C-alpha cells in the first residue's frame, strides 16, 4: 500500500507515521531525510544534489524523483510507502504517478490530518518538557502532578521550544495550506482523499487511519 500523509506541523503526522512503520512495516519516505542520507552516502543522486545545494540552488524535481525511485527499488515490492512532504506541486504529483507505475505500484490513499487552527495554536504553545529527562507536559492538558516537579525524574528544570509560539505556528499553517492547495484537488478528483480529525486523541486518530487503509 502506498499513501500520502498530509498535515500541518503539530497535527501528529510524525506520531502516526511512526506507528504505521512499526505496526505495518511501512517505510516513511521523507524527501528531506532521503536527500541528507544520499548526500552523506555519496550516491550518484546524492552527489548531484550536493552540487546543486552547494551552489545555493533548490534541488530539482528530477533529483527528488530519482531519490524516490532509488528508495522504492531498495525497499522491494512487499513494503508499503508513506510519502511525507512530497508531492507539493502538480508537477510532482504527476512525477509520483510515473515513479509508482514504473515500480508496479499505485497510490492508494491520501490521508489528511485536519486541524482547527486555534486549537492547534493552543496545543503547540502550551507544550513544555523536562530539561533533564525530556518528559512532555502541557499548560492546559498535562501539568506535572506536583507543581514544578517532573513526574518521571523529579527534576525542577523545564524548557520550551523557542519556535512554539503563536506567530510561528500560524506562519507554519499558512505555509502548509499554500503547499497542499495545489495537490489536494488533483487527488480529490480521483477520490483518494480522506480526512481524519487530527485534534482527536492519538489512539482515535490511529484507529481512523487504520479504518481508511483497511476499508
Image (cartoon, grey):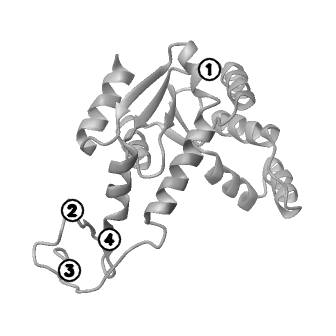
Q: Which residue is mark 3?
A: 153
Give the label, 3 or 1, closer to the camera: 1
Q: Earlier in the sequence, mark 1 or mark 4?
A: 4
* Residue 209 figure quarter: top left
Q: Earlier in the sequence, mark 2 or mark 4?
A: 4
* Residue 13 figure quarter: top left
Residue in the foreground of this view, choosing between 8 and 39: 8
Q: CA distance from mark 2 to mark 1?
A: 39 Å
Give the label, 4 or 3, closer to the camera: 4
Q: Are marks 2 and 1 in contact (CB under 8 Å)?
A: no
* Residue 63 figure quarter: top right
Q: Position of residue 2 (x, y in %)?
A: 53, 27
Q: Earlier in the sequence, mark 2 or mark 3?
A: 2
Q: CA distance from mark 2 to mark 4?
A: 11 Å
Residue in the foreground of this view, choosing between 1 and 4: 4
Q: Earlier in the sequence, mark 2 or mark 1?
A: 2
Name the residue located 56 percent from the left edge and 40 percent from the top edge. 177
Give the label, 2 or 4, closer to the camera: 2
Tell me if mark 1 has few (under 14), some (14-19) or many (20+) residues whose alpha carbon lies within 10 angstroms of its own.
some
Whether residue 100 sits left or right of residue 131 in the image: it is right
Whether residue 194 sits left or right of residue 86 in the image: it is left
Q: Which residue is mark 2?
A: 140
SS under mark 2 = loop
For residue 128, the mark is 4
Q: CA distance from mark 2 to mark 3?
A: 21 Å
Residue in the foreground of this view, choosing between 33 and 194: 194
- Position of the C terminus, as image quadrant, is top left
Q: Are marks 1 and 4 in contact (CB under 8 Å)?
A: no
Q: CA distance from mark 1 to mark 4?
A: 38 Å
Q: Position of residue 98 (x, y in %)?
A: 73, 22
Q: CA distance from mark 3 to mark 1?
A: 49 Å
Amino acid at each position: 500500500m502506498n499513501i500520502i500523509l498530509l498535515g500541518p506541523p503539530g497535527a501528529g503526522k510524525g506520531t502516526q507515521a511512526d506507528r504505521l512503520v512499526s505496526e505495518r512495516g511501512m517505510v516513511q519516505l521523507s524527501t528531506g531525510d532521503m536527500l541528507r542520507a544520499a548526500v552523506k552516502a555519496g550516491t550518484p543522486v546524492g552527489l548531484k544534489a550536493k552540487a546543486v545545494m552547494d551552489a545555493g540552488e533548490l534541488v530539482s524535481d528530477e533529483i527528488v524523483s530519482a531519490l524516490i525511485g532509488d528508495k522504492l527499488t531498495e525497499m522491494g515490492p512487499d513494503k508499503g510507502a508513506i510519502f511525507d512532504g512530497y508531492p507539493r506541486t502538480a508537477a510532482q504529483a504527476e512525477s509520483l504517478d510515473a515513479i509508482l507505475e514504473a515500480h508496479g505500484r499505485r497510490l492508494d490513499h491520501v490521508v489528511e490530518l485536519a486541524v482547527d487552527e486555534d486549537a492547534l495554536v493552543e496545543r503547540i504553545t502550551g507544550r513544555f518538557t523536562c530539561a533533564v529527562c525530556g518528559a512532555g507536559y502541557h499548560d492546559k492538558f498535562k501539568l506535572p502532578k506536583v507543581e514544578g516537579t517532573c513526574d518521571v525524574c523529579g527534576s525542577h528544570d523545564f524548557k520550551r521550544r523557542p519556535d512554539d509560539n503563536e506567530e510561528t505556528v500560524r506562519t507554519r499553517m499558512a505555509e502548509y495550506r499554500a503547499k497542499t492547495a495545489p495537490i489536494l484537488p488533483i487527488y480529490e478528483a480521483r477520490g483518494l482523499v480522506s480526512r481524519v480529525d487530527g485534534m482527536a486523541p492519538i489512539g482515535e486518530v490511529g484507529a481512523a487511519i487504520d479504518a481508511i487503509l483497511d476499508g
